[in-house]
Image (spheres, rainbow, N blue to C red):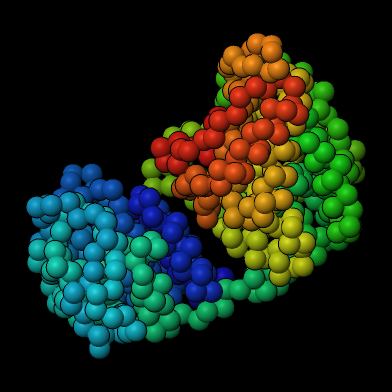
Amino acid sequence: MQNNVLILDFGSQYTQLIARRVRELNIYCEIHPFNNPPKDISTFKAVILSGSPFSVRGENAPHPDLSGIRKEVPLLAVCYGAQYLAHFNGGKVEASEIREYGRANLSVIKAEELLFEDINENSQVWMSHSDTIKELPENGVRLASTPDVLNAAYRIDGEDTYAIQFHPEVYHSTDGKQLLENFLVKIAKVEQEWTPEAFVDMTVADLKEKIGDDKVVLGLSGGVDSTVAAVLLHKAIGKNLYCIFVNNGLLRKGEFESVLDQYKHMGLNVKGVDASARFLDALAGISDPEGKRKAIGKTFIEVFDDEAHLIQEVKYLAQGTIYPDVIESISVNGPSATIKSHHNVGGLPDFMKLKVVEPLRMLFKDEVRRVGAEMGIDKELLGRHPFPGPGLAIRILGDITAEKVRVLQEVDAIFIEGLKEWMLYDKVWQAGAILLPVNSVGVMGDERTYEKVVALRAVESTDGMTADWVNLPYEFLQKTSNTIINRVKGVNRVVYDISSKPPATIEWE
């Protein structure tokens, strides 16, 4: 990669947002933990220090060595980074009298400074810190203030080092993208060459060189990531790509047949394998969410391995791993605590003697969609909602049976088709139904019923890291509930989930 931007991560919840904002400027960037940076910093055109949950005054504060960066590469220090530069270079950082969190406005700006070009006074920014910079570091020059924060931004005289106490990466900072552009393009002179077209050309060339005439097997899921990975590989190696689409019996209603039909029209070499009975047998009696995930993962590897052995001399396994998965696995504190296991992360069992190729491992989800559009993949397929790897198994709370799967498939189909009919599908990031392990009393006709409860879930998000529930029209929810109860035998109550992430997750398991 040329014209890289290095982001050193100090554990901030916003670090991925910095990278996404930089990528929006058509500039390639990489995130590395502050305690494990790349050996050769000289390949990077600029460095950004992220925020952090730590205080620079604490004993466990991250303490990076910036000697190979300062004065060598343009540097932008954000929040914790700004306080770090001040605290260890002759300035003073103290606890704020009042925690500075939320919206603020820049009341004073040195407009002649490149960092604030095209940014006006009173521009809204987002603060998130409990310490504040009382005195600037040696050779520090104040660039901006807010009514409550005197040293909201500064630079260090004699070097291209800039520091800000607010977060330009969050959307609440109205001119945050402009500030990042000023730093990267006007100060650091980074070229804006990271485009979907450039990524496709570069990746196809790299795949050709890496794989040569070897054969690659890829497990398709019907989702955006694996589909875009497949088309990229097909461009590079053509008939040497073998795609396998496994029906685990936990897909949406009719999805196995419809997805296979879609792939047929894309010129991909795809084999459909119906292993639904095998998966349901493996899940029998398992209620624990992580237990279900592990049983599905183990069975998928067994089925996939059986099919891969039918192809002669396969050397590579392709996966649709994307950048958020990679970042989490190399986080500052090592892989984060297991909330739920991920189907693409964790390596392969020893008996699968295949090398792994991951053509999307440096892309965010929105970039994957743009790359797919660049390659002419159908808009409807690219716009599909994310669907969990374990499928409906983690939307059926408790143990899994064929009858429960049937009920949930019927409910889910009514919900998703309704969203499409009401022109709501594209306004929602992810939607689905959950079958709850409770029965409720109801009345149908003159008879008492004691049947299942289902929950509907619809969220809006950009990358799934955070999500808000969608305020769907009451009329839509009313019609959907009536249709489900009237048509799906075994369900007599429908509820709507109005939890956001955090604290809830998007999926219930």
Q: Position of residue 134 (x, y in %)?
A: 9, 63
Is residue 22 in view from this perspective? yes
Q: How many marks?
A: 0
* Quarter containing the C terminus: top right
Q: Quadrant of residue 495?
A: top right
The residue depicted at 73 percent of the width and 45 percent of the height is 417
Q: Quadrant of residue 44?
A: bottom left
Q: Nearer the viewer, residue 434 or 288?
A: 434
Q: Nearer the viewer, residue 372 or 499?
A: 499
> What residue occupies the far bottom of the structure in this picture?
112
The residue depicted at 61 percent of the width and 24 percent of the height is 493
Placement of 495 over or under 334, stated as above or below: above
Placement of 272 over or under 104, stated as above or below: above
Q: Nearer the viewer, residue 112 or 343?
A: 112
* Quarter containing the N terminus: bottom right
471 relative to 55 in the view: left or right: right
Q: Position of residue 328 (x, y in %)?
A: 48, 46
The residue depicted at 46 percent of the width and 66 percent of the height is 21
The residue depicted at 77 percent of the width and 63 percent of the height is 377
Is residue 390 in view from this perspective? no
Q: Position of residue 309 (x, y in %)?
A: 86, 37
212 relative to 14 in the view: left or right: right
Q: Position of residue 406 (x, y in %)?
A: 76, 26
Q: Nearer the viewer, residue 16 or 170?
A: 170
